[in-house]
Image (cartoon, rainbow, N blue to C red):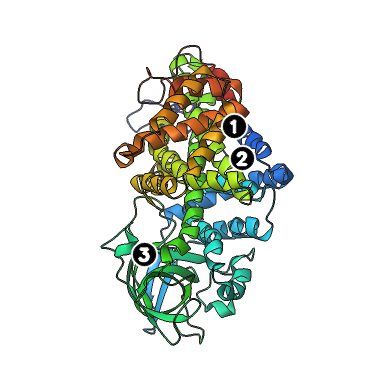
Amino acid sequence: MNARQPAPPHSDSTGPEDRYLAVTHDVVNQPPALENYNLFDQDTALREAVEREGGRAAVEDLQAFGALAGNRETIELGFRANENKPVFNTHDRFGHRIDQVDFHPAYHQLMSIAMEHGLHSSPWTHPGQGAHVARAAKYYMHSQVEAAHCCPITMTFAAIPSIRKQPELAALWEDRILANQYDPRNLPDGQKQSVTIGMAMTEKQGGSDVRANTTRAYPVGVEGPGQAYELVGHKWFVSAPMCDAFLVLAQTTNGLSCFLMPRWRPDGSKNPWQIQRLKNKMGNVANASSEAELRGALAWMVGEEGRGVPTIIEMVAMTRFDCMIGSSAGMRQAVAQATHHCRHRSAFGHRLNEQPLMQNVLADLALESEAAMAYTLRIARALDNQHLQHERLLARLATPVGKYWICKRTPNHAYEAMECIGGSGVMEDCIMPRLLRESPVNAIWEGSGNVQCLDTLRALQKEPDTLDAFFQEVLEAKGTDARFDRFVAQLQNDFTDISDFQYRARNLVDRLALAMQASLLLRGSDPAVADAFCASRLQSGGGLNYGNLPSGTDAAAIIKRATPVVG
């Protein structure tokens, strides 16, 4: 900023012509803000993957949504929602227990955008070729704007397969769950045309070991599926406590069972489950997570009694898939920010994105991002084709593998992208600190890394054909790259004896993920991307950090492919 100031009192100046200018500098060599751009049109890899995986019919819709997601006003909503944490009020001013969580208006606007565009509903209301692919692409763009509010969107979306296990409950709830509108009012669900669904599984003493849950379910009258029970106990994590109902696990005389627990009773009285406090999270701050006690909360059994885990796992599988989308989206936004910055910023006489060492880092980050997205959209296609045995088996094994690997890779990716931007990337008026704080969430929620590896083992033990389906898919790229062929052959050999799988699980699952990503890139991506991925991920000799691509990599082409062109 330029400023004119008068001479100080001790100056010998006698007239205005002797006054001096207190101009320190002109602001130059700074990138324009990454805003008012189309997240779909400016993402070559995403456009190609949507076409490749069967989402061609949705391209026009995705272009329109990409423009909305990249709009300056939409981006600003993400910042406002994160700068204003949700606030919990136990009682109203008259002393009535209300368990009310209040959010900034920006949060509600983001929720409205998501639900009005069907991010919670579209594959269920309009199933068919490309439905999950289109929804995943849209969710991928929306998560780049703000990830935290996507938690209730995901759970509402993911609840449908579980609730459909109990047709009479689905008949009461499904139309309102799938309504493309958002109603945040704290009212009985009977007074609302649109509702959201949350989840309450874990307890203090068990965490991921939900079979250690102690919450009890007592029948109100007749026992069994679809019947009413009262729940007594606690939940250590209740995500999005302002949802209208929750899928909950509780013990009956016949074992752990699944229940649908509304926030209000049918007579309009408050259901007696009480929020104790909101979680004080390092990231994901725009979304409320809570601890709760259930004091005879009315709920209805979903699915077979004693089969609560298999019932709710239908929901968990879909939330794990959304964790893959969300982490892939975080990587994409990090790459977009870093490449955009380096395209405009100069140092030591050259643009940053033209300097060899920075090119190595940027290209490596771009490889990781595209590989994550390609893997995710391939699973979306599998979800669109669950009537096919190969696709069903592939999704069963590839989902925990992908959830483990993609989410695990995100935190260091966010940090490296932040370092590309430098000091400005650490400032809270930049999105990078939020991406970094958000990055561990998906790796831990919906089953941490070890849980995903053990679920991979469970899939192999229960359905050995899942491994055959996985390798059948991977080997679609056989013969296209010698490094890939050697890597996959060794991996197949290492699966001939999995007697100590639990000890070796991370190594084996790492390599399963890399094999799938390499196969997908070899079959569908730009040759420069596929070559660099195989050279850096499937061969030893590189370092552990980003920026270890070997000589001969076409880094400039990879960076150009990944860079949004704005300004």
- Give percent across and percent down for residue 395: 53, 46
Q: Secondary structure at mark 1?
A: loop
Q: Residues within 10 Å of mark 3 (few under 14, many from 20)?
A: many
Residue toward you, 526 or 149: 526
C-alpha span from label 3 to label 2: 33 Å
Above or below, comparing residue 500 to residue 252 in the picture = above
Q: Residue at x 44, y 41 (%)?
A: 401
Q: Mark 1 or mark 3, which has the lower sequence index?
A: 3
Q: The disc labelled 1 sits on which kind of residue?
A: Pro
User: Which disc is residue 39 wearing?
Assistant: 2
User: Which disc is residue 564 wearing?
Assistant: 1
Q: Residue at x 34, y 33 (%)?
A: 9
Q: The disc labelled 3 sits on which kind of residue?
A: Ser
Q: Residue beneath label 3, please?
A: 290
Foreground label between 1 and 3? 3
Q: The disc labelled 2 sits on which kind of residue?
A: Leu
Q: Are marks 2 and 1 in contact (CB under 8 Å)?
A: yes
Q: Residues within 10 Å of mark 2 (few under 14, many from 20)?
A: many
Specify the quadrant of the image occupied by residue 538. Answer: top left
